[in-house]
Image (cartoon, grey):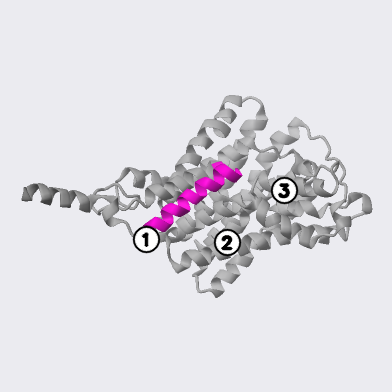
Amino acid sequence: MNTVIESLQQFWQYTGFANMTYQHLIMVLIGIAFITVAIKKDWEPLLLVPIGFGMIIGNIPITEGLNVGIYEEGSVLNILYQGVQKGWYPPLIFLGIGAMTDFSALISQPRLMLIGAAAQIGIFGAYAIALQLGFTPAEAGAIGIIGGADGPTAIFLSSKLAPHLMGAIAVSAYSYMALVPVIQRPIMLMLTTKKERLIRMKPPRAVSQKEKIIFPIVGFILTAMIVPSGMALLGMLFFGNLLKESGVTKRLAETARGPLIDVVTILIGVTVGCSTQADVFLTGSSVKIFVLGLLSFVIATMCGVLFVKFMNLFCKPENKINPLIGNAGVSAVPDAARVSQNAGREFDKSNHLLMHAMAPNVAGVIGSAVAAGILLSFLG
């Protein structure tokens, strides 16, 4: 009888119930909240559902030695997590993004690329604030990249500069990507006048197939020459776009923007979620990262809108730019461009800004990769 009781007691000690702490419970509830928001509000469900469920997986309490935890060398989760730690997954995501992206709006209106560049100021603004809060330069650089609103870039850079902060940085980046409509719209309305919101822009010119093929080749050579350290992200982004635009690699393009990016999105979402174990994630640094991530995102949005207003000072009346597309300088594609479109139609239902907003939006994707390369060059 005593042997049976001792066996049951030993079994109980191995269960999650016996090892559960209030911190684990908090993280499980946060994971459930992510899933709920993704399903009910339809906020980035492809990201928040895997991350939310990953949080639940990662916060089931386990006894050391079972070799199942994400931080236990050789476990299945640890092996899958290597794609995040070593930076394998983000370039594959960029390959899929490139195969999905149409750069026509940017090619036809190259001046709008400057808006995407201006929005990257948020990254460096958050970097400066993070330094003041006591983070090391490498940690500050990894945190600042959240302002680019680009989850894969945030993961890639944090894996190189601050792997111990990767969970908080990745969750923060993806959370704010999901909250693009909530965060950006009030800022856009606060910084623009009714007259500015009614500006109608000229339709973008038609772009030839030849231009579409040349752009990723020339674009990669120029950006990689300027920032060689961003070559992995930039190379895969432009290569994916070339697969799409060449017209002779349709199967490869379909694979890159379909099955491949779906598989990698699942793996990156679940493993990032798993990495948010309570003892690693629930720290004062995580709270600071979330606040800095929000500041970075707000600064990026403000800089994009204000830079359009600055550009308009030098534009003829017929060439003025609607400042409502300034928010699209962050690289949350195409969500930020949709926010521009929806905001514009609130004041003029016949004013369609989506195609115009896609230019700074895709420029933001390139800009965030370039900014990551710059930070990696100086801080890596």
Nearer to us of marks 1 and 2 is 1
Near mark 2 (Cα within 10 A), the count class, few <14, some 14-19 or many ≥20, is many
Q: Residues within 10 Å of mark 3 (few under 14, many from 20)?
A: many
Question: What residue would you read off at disc 2?
Answer: 293
Left or right: 206 in relation to 334: right
Mark 1 vs mark 3: in front: 1
Distance from label 1 to label 3 (Cα)?
38 Å
Residue placed at 79% from the left, 50% from the top? 111
Tell me which segment is drawn in magenta.
23-45
Q: Is residue 122 left or right of residue 198?
A: left
- Where disc 1 sits, the SS reads helix
Say which residue appears at 68% left-offset and 42% top-offset: 218
Q: Residue at x 21, y 53 (%)?
A: 13
Q: Which three-letter amino acid code belongs to the residue tagged 2?
A: Gly
- Give the residue at mark 1: 22
Upstream in sequence: badge 2 or badge 3? 2
Circle 2 SS class: helix
Q: Which residue is mark 3?
A: 339
